[in-house]
Amino acid sequence: MSIYKKIAIGVISVFFFVILVNIGLNYWIKKQLPIIINEKNKTEYNIQYEKIEVSLLSRNINATTLLVSPKNQPKDSKNGLFSKIESITIKHFNIWDLAFNDVIQAESIIINKPRVILYKKGEKLINDSKSIKKEIVEPFRKIVSVSNIYLNDGTVDVVSLDTEKPILSVKKIILKLEGILITDATLDQKIPIQYKSYALVIDSIFYRESAFYHMNIGKISTEKNFLKINNFSYIPQLSRKEFVKYLAKEKDINTLKFDSAHVEKMDWGFKNDRFYFKANSLIVNHFDANIYRGKMPKDDLSKKYLYNHLLRNIKFPLQIDTIQILKSKLVYEEEKEFEKGPGILNFDRFNMQVTNLKSGFGLKKMKDVKIKVNCIFMKNSPLDVIWSFNVLDKKDSFHIQGTISNFDVAAMGRFSKPYMNASFTGVFNKYRFNFYGNDNIAKGNASLDYDDLKVKLYKKKNPEKEAKLKSAIVNLLIKDDSKDKPKTADVELERIQEKSFYNFLWRSIAESLKKILI
């Protein structure tokens, strides 16, 4: 027999041997997989599937129509996690681990159209963060160990068994998670897995944060160093009257919306078990904020800290180099009685830039936080503000200065009456203020250039009635116009500790106007 025939016979024999081995192993693995998935499944979930295919040549496993349900599901009720998955493809699995270690070790897993619903007790999204490790990450690791996860067109719903209302609904999830490492060490960390890179796109999110608010997001897209959010809203679930009934103490009711927010050069995670977040910039477009305070409940007499203190006491490293709020709108409403309606402050075409924003965690020295605002106040008055403070200053010192131009003061009646017991008509051509303050006191000065000013004073014991004699005397004493020389006043004012920074600022402004005009 020639050498060529021997080679040919050898090659053919090897070929047929490989085919026989492949058929045998395919048959054996198909028999082994159900045992791994069901009999040797030590997780809390049953896994069923319609069809499973194994290819030893490509080392791929493909399963279709998978159903996941709790093993200890109560009869005639739903409690726990349920899932239906259109298909799963496991690529480049390790035959040895599958055959002898009862684990599907592979390069990647592709999950198509998973529909996940979790029925849970209570109203919280997560009762215990450790349950994610115990009930999701660890069970997954016991069955499949992969380096990459690709999830296509997924949905997740979390429903409260108590109210039968959705707590969370996430639609059209696309996830790429590469370079995954899950070990006993990572499972003890805050984030129970390590990874080299990720990309996530979500088409929409609904989240019922509490009985009072729900949040909607139109779209999220993020990778390791950027985040973009579109069509965000944070909306009260109750009417103002209903909301106020539930409040034991005064509290703002916030309605927040924006078209888009974009975080650039983002870095976040855990270091030495401590969360950190850093970003080069945050840009928010068309932010629409309505802040409403009903004065019907009791005053909240707890101390209100200034922003220095609040940032200084954040318990993790936070840094955003530049924040920009562009083409936005801010409305503040304050109401003593529903029948009379709220006093309203409008800030339109609102633009704000914040630089050097940091928490004080672990820092001994830092630059001042600087804030610049320009907007249209009360529909027709340009307002410019420059504000700065240092987070590490334990006196909580600040400096704020600004200018309001062409302001029709009649629009301020609802707010000037409570603070000054007065209302005005006329025009402030230009009002300037320059205040330095801290947690205890504010000092500074203000100037006012005005025209056609008339003052109306009210009785202290009956603020609804005009003190006509006092009004007449004041209008005789003050000049209708400031002429070419603005009138000035120095201000010194103690801070009310249970009131906010903005209350402190407004009282300082009101005090300066009182000194200038009355």
Image (cartoon, rainbow, N blue to C red):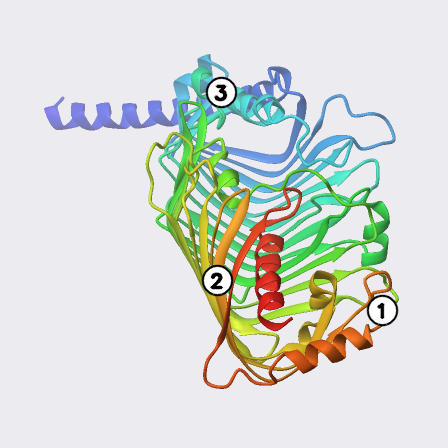
Q: Position of residue 453 (x, y in %)?
A: 63, 82
Q: Quadrant of residue 424?
A: bottom right
- In the displayed structure, 491 sits above or below 44; it is below
Label located before the other in sequence (3 or 2) = 3
Q: Is residue 332 left or right of residue 370?
A: right
Q: Tags 1 and 2 in contact by the CB under 8 Å rule?
A: no
- The span from disc 1 to disc 2 (Cα, nearest Å) is 31 Å
Residue type at numbered disc 1: Glu
Q: Quadrant of residue 132?
A: top right
Q: Which residue is mark 1?
A: 464
Q: Is residue 411 left or right of residue 267?
A: right
Residue type at numbered disc 3: Leu
Q: Position of residue 86 (x, y in %)?
A: 60, 44
Quadrant of the snapshot with the N terminus: top left
Q: Which residue is mark 2?
A: 445
- The span from disc 3 to disc 2 (Cα, nearest Å) is 59 Å
Observer-nearest of 187 and 255: 255
Label located before the other in sequence (1 or 2) = 2
Q: Quadrant of residue 194?
A: top left
Q: Which residue is mark 3?
A: 187
- The span from disc 3 to disc 1 (Cα, nearest Å) is 65 Å
Label 2: state its secondary structure: strand
Residue that appears at 64% across and 38% down:
303
- How dense is the environment of label 2, judged by Cα within 10 Å: few (below 14), some, or many (20 and up)? some
How many numbered callouts?
3
- In the displayed structure, 314 sits above or below 480; it is above
- How dense is the environment of label 3, judged by Cα within 10 Å: few (below 14), some, or many (20 and up)? some
